[in-house]
Amino acid sequence: MQDPTELFQFESDTSPSQLQELQASVLVVALGGFIDAGHTQRLMADHILETHESRVIASFDVDQLLDYRGRRPVMVFDRDHWSSYDDPSLLLHRVVDKEGVPFLLLVGPEPDYQWNRMVEATSTLIKAFGVDLTVSVHGIPMAVPHTRPLGVTAHGTNPRLVTGNDPAFGTVQVPASFSSLLEFRLGEAGLDAIGFAVHVPHYLGQSEFADAAVLGLERVRAATGLDLDLRELAATAGLNRAEISRQMEESDEITAVVRALEQQYDTFLEGRQQRNLLATDLSDLPTADEIGAEFEAFLKDVTEDDEHTDENGDDRG
């Protein structure tokens, strides 16, 4: 493996001699991934940077990590010239919460190449800045209604990090993401890492669903003790719900889907509360393993679509 420290460089105002002064106990990783239903991770990361004091302290060499032809950056053509280029970047920010407590936020596109080297580079920064806990959040599509409390699947490198978790899945195989590999490798090294997969209604998976980002941020706050601002994101979520309600009023089809999911959700909860499960007919409700198998099939379909797109030489966006 090539030297992983050559993948990143500190900013001009962040010299190695200052690392002791820039210590932070938490790293939040937001590097995209295979799937992020409801744009949960992006909304949360954007909100953190927009509402808290921050500065970039290190950047990664994206030319070594990204497949530009696989997901082409956007350029703007203005009449007779190119006027702008959306230059991709992968940056490590030092952010300060409302109480002045610093933490790190790694933001950018998920690397296409050199995952093992990138894991080593990130681990080097984790040790250099004294990080004790690495956290990630993303959204996954689930057959649940937006009108009921959202669920979360928590996972971590140590059982004590996920106490009280009520798993929705059994054992399933899913395509890897960089964040999941980083968590796995940190666990092998005996370091603490935790992730939260927010259950996003499948019919909102391609839209911005701020409620999921709010829940993700709440879980980050609870896991880390950081005092993170929720107000603007919560306000966005309220507007989001109002727009969804408006669309339901205009579409009998959407309303029917939501009502059916509500009935399934309520019946499932009622069944769990029964002392005798036979008192409620749960024969039509999926088990945790069946839900996991359905999610695995969904991911497989997405993978096959991507492979089909690559074979035809089309851009993936």
Image: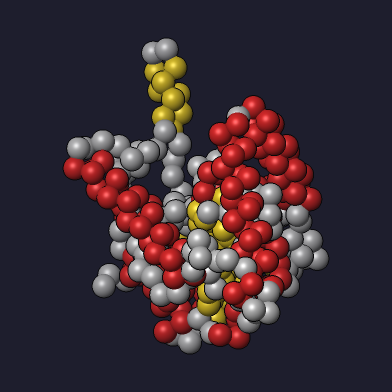
Judging depth in this view, the residue of 208 and 153 nearest the camera is: 153
- Residue 297 lies in what quarter of the image? bottom left
Instruction: Please state the horizontal and vertical placement of residue 27, each as a whole percent of the image.
Output: 58, 69
Residue 64 horizontal side relative to residue 84, left or right: left
- Residue pictured at 70% horizontal, 63% vertical: 218
- Residue pictured at 23% horizontal, 44% vertical: 308
Judging depth in this view, the residue of 295 and 177 nearest the camera is: 295
Whether residue 104 is visible to the viewer of this picture, yes or no, is no
Instruction: Please state the horizontal and vertical placement of residue 174, each as a whole percent of the image.
Output: 37, 65
Residue 150 horizontal side relative to residue 92, left or right: right
- Residue pictured at 44% horizontal, 17% vertical: 78
- Residue 177 position (above or below residue 212): below
- Residue 295 position (above or below residue 307): below
Instruction: Please state the horizontal and vertical placement of residue 3, each as a whole percent of the image.
Output: 32, 71
Which colour scheme appears in the figure?
secondary structure
- Residue 106 position (above or below residue 67): below
